[in-house]
Image: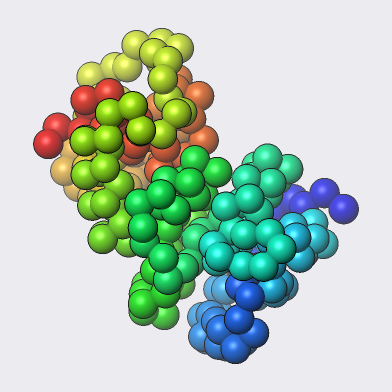
Amino acid sequence: MTPDPSVQSGDPIRVVVVDDQLLLREGLKTLLELHTDLRVVGEAGDGFQGEAIVERTAPQVVLMDLRMPRRGGVAATKQIVARWPRVHVLVLTTYDDDELVFEAIEAGASGYLLKDVGSDALAEAIRAASRGESPLQPSIARKVLRRLRTAGEQQPRFGDSAPAEPFTARELDVLRALGSGATNHEIAESLSLTEGTVKNYVSVILAKTGLRDRTQAALYAVRHGYSGS
């Protein structure tokens, strides 16, 4: 089966939970399904099982732990994103060390959260990921931006080339805001635009740079000096 995570308006967001702790998986399922717009359609205890569940259940979002037996979260994320580009992987882990953060992002993770996140914040992050946004917990966002400003040749390898077409002035405004970690709502308010218009600008930026998502666009902005701070 080829997953097609398209969803009709009003349908619950389909979520798969991949974590080697059974109790945590069960707890997440219980908490998430308190939100009527979320539905856990599958669970897995390692990356191999996670890939099989994704193929079978066609989720919009995968909650992915990182350190698991057999196949860890980074390798599983890379496989899932490569096979099913419209499935969004949201890392949920206890680990916040720099290398794991960057490995997960380079593998294609749409966002990165720590397990101390609140249940409402997690639910909102899943919604954001399903919309193609890239939720990063504030402590992780600060870590990413700080690392990119100081890491030199150790920075992520994507986004080296110039954009296919020059950025317009407004696209540069949006790109700078992305590099500062702003959400679509925050960008819209600061630039006096609608959120839909901001989303369109982000899509154009991704097309011009050949990047996959907002997280990579934010890293690109910092790496190329567009972050403004």
Q: Residue furthest top?
A: 165
Q: Nearer the viewer, residue 152 or 91?
A: 152
Q: Residue furthest left?
A: 229
* Apparent side of residue 71 relative to residue 199 in the rendered image (left or right): right
Figure check: 216 above or below 2: above
Q: Residue at the spot x=12%, y=36% of the render?
A: 229
* Apparent side of residue 40 relative to residue 217 in the rendered image (left or right): right
Figure check: 162 above or below 149: above
Q: Residue furthest right?
A: 1
Q: Nearer the viewer, residue 29 or 198?
A: 29
* Apparent side of residue 198 relative to residue 18 in the rendered image (left or right): left
Q: Position of residue 63 (x, y in %)?
A: 56, 65
Q: Position of residue 195 (x, y in %)?
A: 34, 46
Residue 159 quadrant: top left
Q: Residue at the spot x=79%, y=56% of the render?
A: 55
Can residue 137 be seen in this snapshot? yes
Residue 19 quadrant: bottom right
Q: Position of residue 129 (x, y in %)?
A: 49, 56
Q: Position of residue 186 (x, y in %)?
A: 23, 50
Can residue 132 be seen in this snapshot? no
Figure check: 35 above or below 174: below
Residue 68 quadrant: bottom right
Q: Nearer the viewer, residue 10 or 137?
A: 137
Q: Residue at the spot x=21%, y=25% of the render?
A: 225
